[in-house]
Amino acid sequence: MLFNKIDYLWRLIATGFCFLLFSLGGLLLGYIIIPMAVIIAKIIRSKKQKSEKKHIAQYCIYLTFRFFTATMSGLGLIRFHFIGFDKLKKDKGTLIIANHPTLIDYVSIVSKLPFCDNIVKAQLWRNRFIRRVISTAGYIPNIDPEQTFSDIKATLNSGNNLLMFPEGTRSIANMPIQLKRGAAQIAIRAGVPIRIIHLSCIPSTLAKNDKWYKIPATKPIFTLTVKDLIDTQAILNECNQLPSVAARRLTKILQQQLQGHID
């Protein structure tokens, strides 16, 4: 039908526009928006707290991503359904775990989280579009394992929430997800609870190995569902205080929930 062809062409053009907008947004955030927000905060507040710059940057990212997801929705690219995100308002010092079916998972989640730390792959620190942003936001580089864990434990123990994708990369559509055990080991060793966010995108788009211009025939529906907390200390107790055994059991639980097999 003619309408379907016009809709497809429109979404293809709008997708290219959003990719350009995201790249330019990274530069604007890092070099204009966040620096200006920090300066304004200094003027308004007579005494600047040590962590204020980090929180200002994270809040700017949150507002920018809210605008970006609203733009994608308004252009008719994706329909978003956010379920249970009110649960996150009470979380402190929580490891937030999510599956990773699309390129925009992080953007979509953070558009609902005014303050949240994140683990960033080493290669992204060399990306000129976002390097300044993630550095100012106090995100944790995943370079040296021991230093990374030390930084993770410190931020969680200080009451900050941390978002993590335990697959390490985007999952392949219609294939079982494969988790690395790092997320479970971090939660067990740091003694913090886990909050799971399950994401689904139907039909699949922007998945691993997908080109940006390979869009589906119909508008995708992106559903993000926040689940109940997982008490990692209880799992450790059930495993007789054996961290390695508890990490294996927790990894299995995470895989089942992120795959969507159990509630």
Image (cartoon, grey):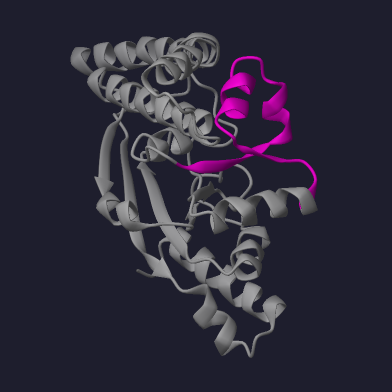
The residue at 35%/26% (across/down) is 63
Judge whether residue 20 can be spotted in this image.
Answer: yes
Above or below residue 41? Residue 104 is: below
| Residue 125 counted in the magenta span | yes
Residue found at the very far front of the displayed protein? 46
Position of residue 219 in the picture relative to residue 251 (left or right): left
Question: Split into 4 quadrants, where in the image is the C terminus?
Answer: bottom left
Tell me: residue 129, above or below residue 124: above
Q: Quadrant of residue 1?
A: top left
Q: Please name whichever residue, 11 or 242, is drawn nearer the observer in this view of the structure.
A: 242
* Marker count (numbered): 0
Picture coordinates of residue 40 (x, y %)?
Answer: 40, 15
**In-front residue for pair 45/151:** 45
What's drawn in magenta, residue-wise?
116-145
Q: Identify the residue shown where x is 64% and y is 46%.
A: 168
**Residue 194 x/y as whole percent:** 48, 63
One can see residue 206 in this view: no
Viewer-closest of 220 and 140: 140
* Up-down relation of residue 191 to residue 19 (above or below): below
Magenta segment includes 177: no
Q: Is residue 103 left or right of residue 246?
A: left
Q: Residue at x 49, y 10 (%)?
A: 28
Q: Where residue 156 sits in the image (x, y, percent)?
A: 55, 55
- Judged left or right of residue 234, residue 12 is left
Horizontally, is 189 left or right of 2 in the view?
A: right
- On the image, the x and y values in percent for residue 61 come to 44, 27
In terms of depth relative to the viewer, which is nearer, 47 or 80? Answer: 47
